[in-house]
Image (tube, helix red, strand yellow):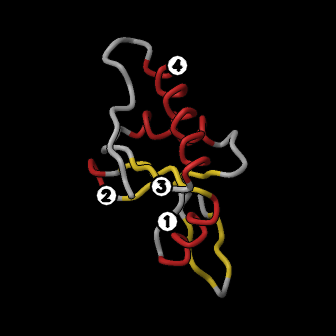
Amino acid sequence: MFYGHDLVPASGERAAGGTAKAQKLAERVSKTQKEYDFEPLKASERRIIHLAVAEFDDVTTYTIGDGLLRKVVISPKTSATDAMRRGILPYFRCVKSSPSFKRIK
């Protein structure tokens, strides 16, 4: 089940506000074991989410969509593994070679 959410306030507190909201949502994903997707965001805002959620051991993030429609999904670790198997790329770009994925720059 997916939920939409406005990530950051309109004021200059984007990074702090975005980090706090991302961490709160990561805790919710951890408890409910349900993925959460944000509305399409700018690259800088997506990065804030990825960095804030990286501190959690039981959830992960990945980005879906193209161009201006790219959005972040916070997912339980097991669900993210399933997403990779379905062909959805995680935050870093991957290429499929043999049975494993390699990180490319």
Q: Residue at x 63, y 51 (%)?
A: 59
Q: Amino acid at mark 1?
A: Leu
Q: Residue furthest top?
A: 12
Lower sequence index among marks 1 and 3: 3
| Circle number at residue 89 | 1
Which disc number belongs to residue 35?
A: 3
Residue 69 image offset from top left, x and y in percent: 27, 51
- CB atoms of marks 4 and 1 within 8 Å: no
C-alpha span from label 1 to label 3 = 15 Å
**Secondary structure category for the residue under label 2:** loop
Q: Nearer the viewer, mark 4 or mark 2?
A: 4
Q: Residue at x 32, y 44 (%)?
A: 4
| Residue wearing tag 4 | 16
Q: Considering only order in the chain, which callout, 1 or 2, is on the residue closer to the N terminus?
A: 2
Separation of residues labelled 3 and 4 (CA atoms):
23 Å
Q: Residue at x 37, y 49 (%)?
A: 71
Spot the residue most to the left. 68
Give the amino acid at mark 2: Asp
The image quarter containing residue 41 is: top left
Residue drawn at x 66%, y 70% is 102
Label 4 sits on what residue type?
Ala
As measured in the structure, the alpha-carbon distance from the residue carrying label 4 to the one carrying label 1 is 27 Å
63 to 48, vertically: above or below: below
Q: Is residue 21 positioned above or below 35 on the image?
A: above
SS under mark 3: loop
Name the spot of residue 21 as percent of width and height, x first.
49, 29
Residue named by callout 2: 66
Q: Which of the two marks, 4 or 1, is nearer to us in this view?
A: 4
Task: Tell which of 79 and 85 is nearer to you.
Answer: 79
